[in-house]
Amino acid sequence: QVQLVESGGGLVQAGGSLRLSCAASGSIRSINVMGWYRQAPGKQRELVASITRGGTTNYADSVKGRVTISRDGAKNTVYLQMNSLKPEDTAVYYCNAAVEPWGRRESNYWGQGTQVTVSS
């Protein structure tokens, strides 16, 4: 079993910062890409940022310059540092990881989501 557990969401004023964390646990042989997605009410889930095992990052245009994704391979954890937050960043943020469990093929796993609310 593989689990992704997010933490760090909350309520923040516009211009503020939040740091999200997502820890993967279970019978993990390797983790390839890790990423953060978000879904606002009435909207489709969208990619915020992703990072490969080698450290290559990718960001949505809407967050470039304000958000930094990083990962700690030893801890199987991915982070999302969000600065200069805007009300339009309000959404449920989901962690995603391409995980190869021991004895099984690589699959996509999702966290339960953490709410980020930015007040104006």
Image: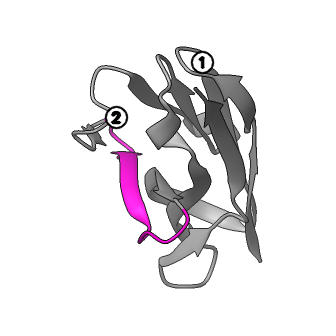
Q: How many marks?
A: 2
Q: Quadrant of the C terminus?
A: top right
Give the image location of residue 95, x and y in percent. Answer: 58, 56
Give the residue at x 49% y 84%.
Answer: 105
Name the outermost residue toward the front: 120
Residue 56 located left or right of residue 99: left
Q: Which mark is residue 33?
A: none
Q: Is residue 101 shown above or below 61?
A: below
Q: Does the magenta stretch mainly form a helix, a strand or a loop? A: loop
Q: Quadrant of the N terminus?
A: bottom right
**Looking at the image, what colour scheme do you see?**
one colour
Give the residue at x 28% y 38%.
Answer: 62
Residue 64 occupies which quadrant of the picture? top left
Q: Residues within 10 Å of mark 1 (few under 14, many from 20)?
A: some
Q: Is residue 1 shown above or below 113?
A: below
Q: Which mark is residue 55?
A: 2
Give the image location of residue 35, x and y in percent. Answer: 46, 51
- The magenta segment: 41-55
Q: Is residue 23 visible?
A: no
Give the residue at x 47% y 56%.
Answer: 37
Disc 2, SS: loop
Q: Nearer the viewer, residue 66 or 77?
A: 66
Q: Amino acid at mark 2?
A: Gly
Q: Which mark is residue 17?
A: 1
Residue 46 shown in magenta: yes
Disc 1, SS: loop
Give the residue at x 50% y 56%.
Answer: 38
